[in-house]
Image (spheres, rainbow, N blue to C red):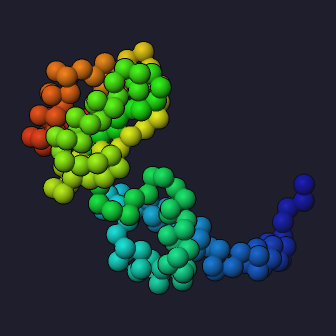
Amino acid sequence: MDDLKTNDINTVMSVVKDIISDNEKNKGVLIPTLHKIQSDNGYLPSDTLKELSKVLGLPLAEIYSVASFYKQFHFTPRGKNIVRVCTGTACHVRGASKVLHALEDNFDVKAGSTTEDLKMTLETVGCVGCCGLAPVITVNEDVVGTVNAKKLKEIITDLDEGKDYGKN
Ligand code: FES
């Protein structure tokens, strides 16, 4: 293969620059920037997204559209602990709805939302792959299987007391 001469490289760079507009370059940094914003704040604050829109020269609607496409981005503050109740078939059969209702009642929060004191975000999730341990919940990174009344009470107490649960 022939070595590229400087002139060849300049020609290639010029072609690439023509093809990749500034707008497209800014789109390329959008997702990593959204990740950083969420990592710093726990969610994507609307004021920060407005600033990002100005800095990148991208319409705010486009930023929301991209962020909404990915499930991992959140537009409202999240709780200190993220509790997910598995509602897959095996867990459903073994009482997932009782577990979910107990958590909803205890923390006065509905699935899909966060407590006012930001102690906990409660969500449901499809099968997490531990069906033999149904019913299953996850607390942050921890998987808790065979959730019974006693176990659930312990978890609720831990969450109430603000214990850092399942964060490595
Ligand atoms: S259905 Fe809950 S872990 Fe599979």
Query: What x and y, as percent, mark residue 142?
Result: 31, 31
155 shown above or below 42: above
Q: Is residue 85 visible?
A: yes
Q: Position of residue 8 (x, y in %)?
A: 84, 73
- What residue is drawn where x is 18% and y is 31%? 155
Q: Is residue 138 visible?
A: no
Q: Nearer the viewer, residue 119 or 50?
A: 119
Residue at the far top in the pictured view: 132
Q: Is residue 117 left or right of residue 87?
A: left
- Identify the residue at horizontal 27%, vertical 22% (top origin): 147
**Residue found farthest to the left:** 161
Horizontal relation, residue 7 to residue 87: left or right: right
Compared to 99, does 159 lie above or below?
below
Residue at screen point 35% across, 77% down:
47
From the top left corner, tell me how far across and down residue 48 is, in percent.
37, 75
- Indicate the quadrant containing the N terminus: top left, top right, bottom left or bottom right: bottom right
Looking at the image, which is closer to me, 17 or 75? Answer: 75
The answer to which quarter of the image holds residue 44 is bottom left
Asked if residue 133 lies left or right of residue 57, the reply is: left
Q: Quadrant of residue 168?
A: top left
Please identify the quarter of the rendering in which residue 102 is found: top left
| Residue 125: percent from left, percent from top | 42, 38
Q: Residue at x 90, y 59 (%)?
A: 2
* Along the viewing direction, whichever of 128 and 47 lies nearer the viewer: 128
Q: How many marks?
A: 0
Residue at the farthest right position = 1
